Amino acid sequence: MTISDLAVYLQMSQSSLYKLVQRGSVPGHKVGRHWRFHKVSIDRWLQESSVKPSRPSKK
């Protein structure tokens, strides 16, 4: 995926996505001057970064 494809997929602006990519928050690879992303890696990243409900502690 290109950065424009990913922006559509994540429903966010390209400028916001560039900021996340430059910080290393989004898994991707730079090929020359262009960023490329694997859909499987993005889906895994989304799943891992989603908020998980906390379990009540057993006492």
Image (cartoon, grey):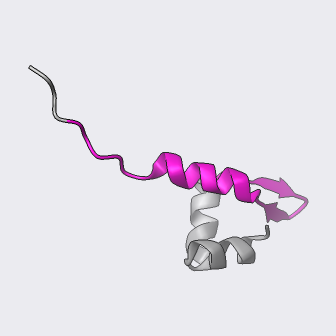
Query: Going by the picture, which residue comes out furthest to the front?
Result: 58
Is residue 20 visible in the rendered structure shown here? Answer: yes
Q: Is residue 25 left or right of residue 54?
A: right
Answer whether residue 41 is magenta in the image: yes
Residue 41 vs 7, above or below: the answer is above
Query: Going by the picture, which residue comes out furthest to the right?
Result: 32
Q: Quadrant of residue 6?
A: bottom right
Q: Is residue 54 left or right of residue 41?
A: left
* Nearer to us in this view, 9 or 4: 9
What residue do we see at 51% from left, 45% from top?
Answer: 48
Answer whether residue 7 is magenta in the image: no
What residue do we see at 65% from left, 56% from top?
Answer: 42
* Nearer to us in this view, 59 or 48: 59
Quadrant of the image for the C terminus? top left
Magenta residues span 27-55
Q: Is residue 36 left or right of residue 25?
A: right
At which x and y percent is residue 16?
Answer: 55, 72
